[in-house]
Image (cartoon, rainbow, N blue to C red):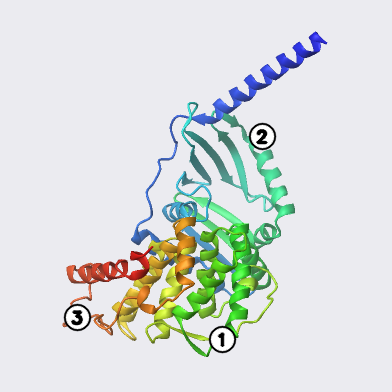
């Protein structure tokens, strides 16, 4: 018996030493990819243009197409994905892609919580273009910490991963079916594919579910269904504050065992989808329980301001406030060139929506306080400034338009004044 206990003790000791050695070999004191700061406004504008430029929706069903993206743009898109608010490791992962002739390298560094062993887990994979239409890319080497796999082992790992993804995720298989070839050139990645509209709708729904958490998906279905039912009780023309009071009041009185932050995210996204006539259950690949009734929502007597507010709030709650600001400002600058002209009132609605969402999702405590506050008497003046003194209809080229350059001091001061006015609103002063 003593021998058996001794054997078990020695075995556990050796196993612990082995696992400890493996763990130590995976950790590094420094990152192979430096951490980068938050994306700036010009980078977010670049991402928006890339999405529009490479969107497969521009192609007809069955059409052959190709997309070429530069190394810099690829790194920018990956950085945005890693900084997304809903990504669990946001702010702790940095990556770098290097594209050469027929070869590419992906490096990733994960910043760990403070510990005495090592601060980072570093990962590196080297791939090459493949003539094999079934694999597209070949893994030349994979390295995790100090552990490195050669070509045969790396390709075996990639093949097993590929087979597993094919079996577990239908959308992965459908995406793979559309891709005909992948070519790596110095500084460029080119992909040729065949666009299938039918499969695209399935992929869009399934991928939409994958990029959000299960908890947020549940909340989106709950609150989009509630809004659909609630819409039948609303008048044809309704003020935004009334709808906000109804939605957030329902969340405050009937918690669905969800985080208040998640609930508030779902409410803002559901309301933005409502004013854009989008069906959230359908977008998530689920059945629509109740058809909503079309209603026109107004803010300060204007439907466009309600849309600005809700869409900016939804973008902020799902991604980040910088992207919401870029999209709002870009539209206003476009309007200054043609159409209705630049509107500081619209811009104020954008920033009011951003500020509202920041308060709604900053923490569970603030999210719950906001639900309580909004469930009582809520007026437009609580969350949206007066627009009487805000210039509108401003057009580029007008010599009397002192705000035509967004980089000018006049524009900066006016924008700062609007943002300060928003921060001084009762909603934010009382919470």
Q: Secondary structure at mark 3?
A: loop
Q: What is the x, y in percent for residue 390?
A: 26, 80
Q: Is residue 319 visible?
A: no
State the residue at coordinates (63%, 25%). Answer: 19
Circle 2 Cα neighbour tier, 10 Å, few/some/many (<14 / 14–19 / ≥20): some
Q: Secondary structure at mark 1?
A: loop
Q: Secondary structure at mark 2?
A: helix
Between the residue at mark 1 and the residue at mark 3, the CA separation in whole angstroms equals 38 Å
Q: Nearer the viewer, residue 277 or 251?
A: 251
Circle 3 Cα neighbour tier, 10 Å, few/some/many (<14 / 14–19 / ≥20): few
Q: Nearer the viewer, mark 1 or mark 3?
A: 1
State the residue at coordinates (48%, 40%). Answer: 109
Which residue is labeled 1 in the image?
A: 294
Between the residue at mark 1 and the residue at mark 2, the CA separation in whole angstroms equals 57 Å
Q: Nearer the viewer, mark 3 or mark 2?
A: 3
Determine which quarter of the picture holds residue 337. bottom left
Q: Nearer the viewer, mark 1 or mark 2?
A: 1
Q: Quadrant of the C terminus?
A: bottom left
Which residue is labeled 2 in the image?
A: 153
**Residue 162 appears left or right of 40:** right
Q: For residue 401, which numbered disc appears in the image?
A: 3
Q: Earlier in the sequence, mark 1 or mark 2?
A: 2
């Amino acid at each position: 018996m003593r021998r058996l206990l001794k054997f078990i003790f020695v075995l556990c000791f050796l196993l612990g030493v082995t696992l400890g050695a493996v763990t130590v070999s995976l950790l590094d004191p420094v990152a192979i990819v430096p951490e980068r700061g938050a994306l700036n406004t010009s980078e977010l504008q670049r991402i928006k243009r890339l999405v529009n430029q490479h969107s497969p929706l521009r192609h007809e069903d069955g059409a052959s197409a190709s997309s070429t993206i530069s190394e810099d743009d690829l790194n920018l898109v990956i950085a945005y994905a890693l900084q997304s608010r809903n990504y669990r490791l946001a702010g702790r992962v940095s990556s770098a892609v290097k594209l050469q002739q027929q070869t590419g390298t992906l490096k990733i560094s994960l910043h760990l919580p403070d510990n005495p062993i090592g601060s980072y887990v570093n990962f590196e994979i080297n791939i090459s273009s493949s003539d094999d239409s079934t694999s597209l890319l070949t893994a030349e080497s994979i390295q995790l910490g100090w552990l490195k796999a050669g070509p045969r082992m790396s390709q075996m790992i990639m093949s097993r991963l590929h087979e597993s993804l094919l079996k577990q995720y239908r959308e992965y298989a459908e995406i793979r079916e559309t891709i005909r070839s992948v070519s790596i050139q110095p500084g460029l990645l080119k992909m040729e594919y065949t666009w299938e509209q039918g499969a695209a709708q399935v992929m869009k729904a399934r991928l939409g579910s994958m990029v959000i958490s299960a908890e947020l998906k549940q909340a989106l279905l709950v609150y989009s269904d509630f809004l659909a039912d609630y819409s039948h009780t609303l008048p044809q023309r309704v003020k935004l504050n009334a709808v906000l009071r109804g939605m957030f009041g329902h969340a405050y009185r009937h918690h669905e065992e969800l985080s208040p932050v998640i609930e508030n995210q779902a409410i803002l996204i559901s309301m933005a989808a409502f004013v854009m006539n989008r069906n959230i259950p359908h977008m998530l690949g689920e059945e629509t329980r109740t058809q909503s009734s079309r209603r026109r929502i107004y803010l300060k007597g204007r439907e466009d301001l309600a849309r600005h507010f809700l869409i900016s709030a939804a973008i902020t709650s799902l991604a980040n406030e910088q992207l919401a600001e870029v999209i709002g400002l870009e539209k206003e600058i476009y309007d200054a060139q043609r159409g209705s002209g630049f509107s500081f009132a619209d811009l104020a609605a954008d920033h009011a929506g951003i500020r509202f969402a920041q308060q709604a999702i900053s923490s569970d405590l603030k999210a719950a306080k906001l639900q309580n506050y909004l469930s009582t008497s809520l007026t437009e003046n609580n969350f949206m400034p007066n627009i009487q003194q805000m210039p509108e209809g401003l057009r580029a080229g007008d010599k009397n338009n002192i705000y035509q350059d967004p980089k000018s001091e006049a524009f900066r001061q006016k924008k700062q004044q609007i943002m300060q006015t928003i921060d001084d609103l009762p909603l934010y002063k009382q919470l």
